[in-house]
Amino acid sequence: MQARLDGARWQVVPAYLGALSCTAVSFAGRHLRVSIHPLLARLTACVGAAGAASSAAAGLFAPVFTMPKPTGPYRVGKTTRLWIDRSRRSWLLKNKARSISHWSPYDRVGVVNADP
């Protein structure tokens, strides 16, 4: 949901992984009636806390930058493209993929930002 609203940010991945591990252990203990060793419960809580702390630190030390408001005669348009290289494999996905965002001048008639 966050990636859809605000764009994917690598800074939040540790927090999501920590929350996922805490949720999985809690779900297994409560709903699947699996006996969870107290040491595993504490370790999972530490993983969740470390994920949250590292995400907060990443947000402080590598913040998402903001662009200054443009002052020229044209508005700024943003184009996002997903480029997929079907000839290369990825360890996580079927094919290599790159998401590229491009900001450029924009006018209503499409003269400045027209595709060739």
Image (cartoon, helix red, strand yellow):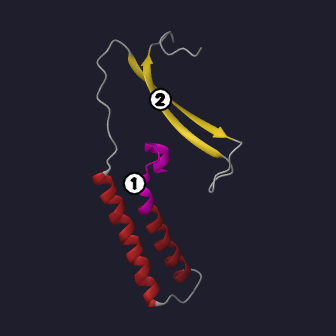
x and y, in percent, of residue 48 in the image: 40, 71
Dot 1: what SS? helix
**What residue sits right under mark 1 in the picture?**
11
* x and y percentages locating residue 97 in the rendered image: 61, 43
Residue 4 location, x and y as percent?
A: 50, 45
Relative horizontal placement of residue 7, taking residue 34 as reference (left or right): left
**What range of the chain is rendered magenta?**
1-14
Residue 52, located in which quarter of the rendered image?
bottom left
| Residue 1 on image: x %, y % | 49, 50
The label shown at residue 102 is 2
Q: Are marks 2 and 1 in contact (CB under 8 Å)?
A: no
Give the quarter of the image for residue 106.
top left
Q: Is residue 107 above or below residue 104?
A: above
User: What's the amino acid at mark 1?
Assistant: Gln
Residue at (36% x, 71% y) in the render: 49
The amino acid pointed to by label 2 is His
Mark 2 and mark 1: Cα distance apart in space: 21 Å
Position of 20 relative to 108 (above/below): below
Q: Quadrant of residue 69?
A: top left
Q: Is residue 17 above or below residue 2?
A: below
Q: Secondary structure at mark 2?
A: strand
Q: Nearer the viewer, residue 55 or 92?
A: 92
Disc with the residue nearer the chain's start (2 vs 1): 1
Indicate whether 16 appears above or below 89: below
- Residue located at (41% from left, 56% from top): 12
What residue is rendered at 41% in x and 73% in y? 47
Q: Which mark is residue 101?
A: none
Q: Residue furthest right?
A: 87
Mark 1 nearby-residue class (10 Å; few <14, some 14–19, many ≥20): some
Residue 10 shown in magenta:
yes
